[in-house]
Image: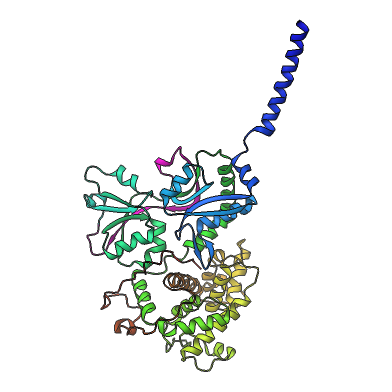
Amino acid sequence: MSRFISTFRSNSARLTLVLAVVLATGCTRPTTLQEIRDEGVLHVITRVAPSIYYQDQDLDTGYDYELARLFADELGVELRVRVAEDNSEILSVLSRNYAHIGLAGLTKRPDLEGAYYTLPIGVTAQSVIVYNKEVPAPESLDDLASETMHMLADSNHEHLIADATDDQAPLIEKHPGLDAAGLLARVESGEFSYAVIASNELDLNHVFFPKVYEAFALNEPSDLVWLFPGAQDDSLVNAASVFMERVRNNGTMAQLAERFYGHLDRLTYVGARTFMHHVENRLPRYQSLFRDYAEASGMDWRLLAAIGYQESHWRPNAVSPTGVRGLMMLTRTTANYIGINNRLDAEESIEGGARYFRMVHGRIPERIPEPDRTWFALASYNVGFGHLEDARRLAESAGKNPDRWMDVKEFLPLLAQKEWYSKTRFGYARGNEPVVYVQNIRRYYDVLVRVTAPDSPAPSEPESELAWLEDNPEASVGEPQTDFRAELPPELQLIPPTL
């Protein structure tokens, strides 16, 4: 009997050990990260917003999307995107663990704690009060007592108002299904007097709504985050954290921020009104020319039109003090080189501009990826290839990346300083100008993509131009003698890509 007991105990011990090994190696549930690698798919849920995710010409892009794509590439899996109506749907899907990551443009607000893991993505935002220009400008929440404050559903803002106010707080009205552009459009029209919106979404949309004024922020800048279901283990968020640290350290994150946010301060209120007026009244005369010659040169006609606007405000008889002239402001040397006889003829000028830009773009090294290659080409179009190469060499000598626009644009202005241009091959240049030039064109291109289609036909009959704008397109005082509003057709729900 004692032998039996001893044998049983020995066998029991061995069985326990075997079971422990089996449980440890074959029967435990794999981690979230392992499940993703086994399936070969990273599932994300997002909403359409210029700050997060959108499509342009069947290409997916957006700051959060580009980060997620790079993360999926690092994991060696496919990125699969599901688009939600709004943040409420995103949170609902994540709460049921039906997606791995939520891209919602949210900050780490109190009600998310415990329900979701959060991870900063390198962009900060504030909650900003905006108002229609026809209503009194508020200076604090006290000025908004009993007013209705409109906001998107499940946004970053509701708790800030609730925490900061008393019984005289503004009335909060949330709008499921609306996006930032829809909210701002209603403030623009006067349907909503006051609203609160994330500052990064305001920056991306503000140019389209010049009757929307910014009042004040409710908080200090806070990190925007990715959301991970609380039902997951922490293997995926830990891997994502390591990834974020790597792209932060190697400059990839900063480059994405430059791509999507680096040019948004280039169009003032007056400039936006003037530009939108010219889109309606000047562009129709030349749109078919831009489209035809851009297509012949293999470029987006809206980029060619943006260059033309930066050069001359679409005026075919423009002449500069230095002798460049025409709608595309070609020099005599350039015109002769590319075979243009009459620079003041709009069609010849546009044809010449398209042909010349394609030549300039072709000189930029092919190893430079888009969109940086186009930005370099724009700078070269403005300041000359030699000066651009000088700036790239300066950047490289300083340990920066000569193939990255965000690095090189820091060195272009140095070409106007003797201590720097004396070290270069091509010498002095007004290096600030190509930086501003590129930023302006990027912003004009953004607007044109928003209000036009790549191959849309030109309107048949342009309206007559207003004299005050025709005579002085840079006018900065006084109001136009029209009730012009930079409103967009309701079917346009996307902000364009930042070139």
Vertical placement of 168 versus 370: above or below? Answer: above
Residue 441 visible: yes
Residue in the image at 45% along x and 61% along y: 50
Magenta residue check for 291: no
Residue 449, placed above or below residue 195: below
Q: Nearer the viewer, residue 413 or 463?
A: 463
Q: Is residue 110 magenta?
A: yes
Q: Position of residue 348 (x, y in %)?
A: 51, 90
Q: How is the image coloured?
A: rainbow
Q: Position of residue 370 (x, y in %)?
A: 58, 67
Where residue 286 appears, as percent x and y from the top left, is: 44, 84
Image x and y of residue 396, in percent: 63, 65
Question: Quadrant where the N terminus lies?
Answer: top right
Residue 328 visible in the picture? no
Q: Which residues are magenta?
A: 108-137
Side of 485 relative to 40 (left or right): left
Q: Nearer the viewer, residue 425 or 128?
A: 128
Would you place residue 245 above or below residue 56 in this image? above
Q: Is residue 305 left or right of residue 73?
A: left
